[in-house]
Image: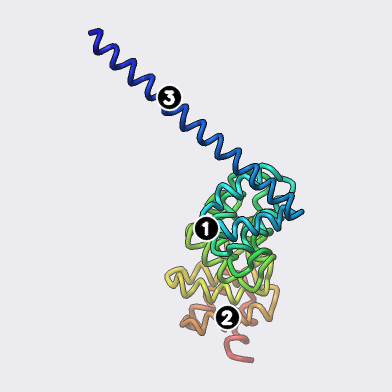
Amino acid sequence: MRKLLYSVMLLAVTGTTAVATETTETTNKNRETIEFIQRQVAQNMSIGRAIKSIVSHYPQDVEVVVGTALDLYPDQYKEVIHAAISAQPALTEDVVRIALEKGITSCTNIVETAINAEPSYVDFVASAAVYSTPEELDDIVRVAVVTEPNSADAIVRSVAKAHPNKLVDIIKTAMEAVPFVGEYIVDALLAAYPDNADEVVTTAIKESASHHDNLQRILETARSAGLTDEQLTQYAINAGANAEEVAAILKGD
């Protein structure tokens, strides 16, 4: 019994020592990271230049570098995010996720900053943001489309892939923010979701009913995607569009 008790106590002490050692190592590593970043900031005279330099040389450490920088300089989050993404565009999604987890500012501020840093990765930014904060989907789509309207099709397609049950809301939000992107959204979504043509076209037409040119482009795009005039007429009627106007557009008048 005494031998058993001694063994249990030895294991407990050994386990506690291991945990304490691990905690100490983590604390020391964190302190070293903090000191390293602070030295780089002092040498570069700018948090942005410092982070860009560090992430360029140590992309594998982006998590700890960006996370620590945001802890140290939360008011300069734009510089930190912009610098990290500019240094390693392929890590855009990771940088957005880290910033969102830190909660240093609103989700939409992070999305806008990240898109401005690397517009070509806008769909990755939107996807990462929606994954981390799905309750802010509408605001994320709105900000992303307004910030980079030329990529509206990629934004909507990417977000819809993660949340297909929100397809109508995504289309509506994007087109309310930037009405003229309707044709691009319809083109992208009909290719990705041909079985949802009713939802896609009806929603797009509903959002464009008061804009003749936008309505015309949407109908022409949907027709080019393979939908018949009969289908388009029915979708337009369901969306509340002017039947005569739709008929004239489809006849080419």
| Nearest to viewer (mark 3 / mark 2) | 3
Is the C terminus in the top left, top right, bottom left or bottom right quadrant? bottom right
From what the image shows, is residue 135 above or below residue 20?
below
The N terminus: image quadrant: top left
Mark-to-mark CA distance, 1 and 2: 22 Å
Residue 79 image offset from top left, x and y in percent: 71, 55
Q: Amino acid at mark 2?
A: Leu
Which kind of residue does numbered mark 3 sit on? Thr
**Mark before the other along the chain sequence, 1 or 2:** 1
Farthest residue, direction right: 45
Marking on residue 43: none
Whether tag 3 and tag 2 are in contact, CB under 8 A, the answer is no
**Residue depicted at x 62% and y 87%:** 248
Q: Is residue 64 above or below residue 127?
A: above
Amino acid of disc 1 = Lys
The answer to whether 14 appears left or right of 105 in the picture is: left
Residue designated by label 2 = 219
Instruction: Please provide percent x and percent y for residue 85.
Output: 62, 61
Instruction: Please tell me whether mark 1 sits on a helix, a strand or a loop.
Output: helix
Name the foreground residue: 22 vs 206: 22
| Residue in the image at 71% along x and 56% along y | 48
N-term mark: 1 or 3: 3
Q: Earlier in the sequence, mark 3 or mark 2?
A: 3
Give me the disc on residue 166: 1
Q: Residue at x 66, y 63 (%)?
A: 117
Q: Position of residue 184 (x, y in %)?
A: 58, 76
**In which image quadrant can residue 127 be found?**
bottom right
Image location of residue 75, percent across then percent down:
74, 46
Q: How dense is the environment of label 3, judged by Cα within 10 Å: few (below 14), some, or many (20 and up)?
A: few
Q: Is residue 248 above or below residue 180?
A: below
**Relative to 236, does residue 170 appear above or below in the rendering?**
above
- Tell me the number on the disc at residue 17: 3
